[in-house]
Amino acid sequence: MIIADPGCATLGGTPGVTDTHVPACYFNFVPFDNLVEEQEQYQSYLEYNLDLGESTRFHVAGFYSQTDVPQYRTSPSFLASQVPTTGASPGQTTIPGRFSVPSSNPGVLNFVAQNPALVRNLPAAAQANLNDPAGILINLNPLFRPFGVGGNPATGSTNFGTRTADAFRLTASLNGQLARTSKWDVGVTYMENGYLSTNQDIPVTRLQAALQGFGGFNCTGTIPGRNGCLYYNPFSSAIVKNIIDGQVNPNFVASSANSAELARFLFASALRRLWRQRRRYLRSKTVGSMAGHRLAGTARLGRYFFPRAADQHPDTQFGHCAGILAAGRRFQGSPSVR
């Protein structure tokens, strides 16, 4: 049995299905973006010309430009497109290929309390495991966003990155006349372009640890949710409202909301950096007739360097997809508007 989080539509999400016809909850993250980002642009150009005798001229020119986007708005969080390693320690999953959530997670408790009719229709083994504090695990499909329509608690809005692009070019040349009817030109140009993209992201080990109640910078001990340890609630009961259109969540439970401290912990150690750089070197020489008849052609020798760019996974609009394991049967459900 596969279901979607009942709070999906209430918070402005769109209940739907995946390409394999699994119920899911979608949300539009475009309103979190800017139409035009705030930018800082710098440009400079320098040119120098020098006559060497009556018919020869030396030319040198340099150009530099830089564009900075100090606060690039993105989706409140990116897809958890990888899964933690399998094991029994905090930050590890007990279900290969899935995130695991113990039934002691406040979000699970809220889900059971707020959906009694739905829970009654589950198989008896699944109901028993849901009510066992040390028992059942809920598994989350890795294609989900930890934060969505409720925004990013760490910023009160969305996730922010930076973008920086720069370009540099230096040209030098000599030109002159060989005779009254002939001219010559030799030159060299060096160009360089760079682009740096940074994005805050969540390590899957931290996300898994928080699902198990071991999130937070001050987490000590071995008891989940105690001694500075925080739970991450993956259900819609953690969301007070849709911060884009203001729709209020009637099933919000303040005691199980995801705090700014927890969000800062989740994002703290992950900064995705993508650096692209291109260099080009060009030499040229020309000998020709001043009357327009070419005496000798143009020769160009080039060298190109393209470093391998870092990999980036494509983003999609999936929400949560949770499930329950019971007596060897898997009950998947509760994709929520995260």
Image (spheres, grey):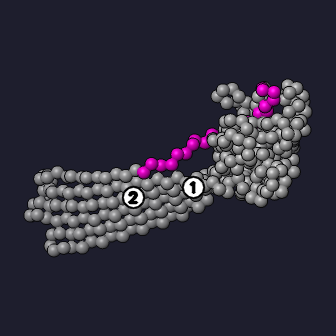
Circle 2 residue: 192
Stretch of the chain drawn in magenta: 307-329
Say what secondary structure mark 2 lies in: strand
Q: Secondary structure at mark 1?
A: strand
As drawn, 113 above or below 48 = above
Q: Position of residue 33 (x, y in %)?
A: 64, 50
Q: Position of residue 249 (x, y in %)?
A: 83, 44
Q: Amino acid at mark 1?
A: Thr
Can you tell which quarter of the image residue 323 is in? top right
Residue kind at label 2, given as amino acid type: Glu
Q: What's the distance in space between the residues labelled 2 and 1, CA to CA?
A: 20 Å
Please indicate, yes or no, whether residue 37 appears anywhere in the rendered image.
Answer: no
Residue 79, horizontal then vertical, whole percent: 65, 43
Residue labelled with disc 1: 198
Q: Answer left or right for 278 relative to 85.
A: left
The residue at 81%/55% (across/down) is 221
Is the N terminus in the top left, top right, bottom left or bottom right quadrant? top right
* Label 2, residues with CA under 10 Å away: few <14, some 14-19, many ≥20: some
Q: Quadrant of the C terminus?
A: top right
Q: Is residue 112 left or right of residue 321?
A: right
Nearest the viewer among 164 and 287 is: 164
Residue 28 screen position, x and y as percent? 68, 42
**Which one is nearer the viewer's eye here, 325 or 115?**
325
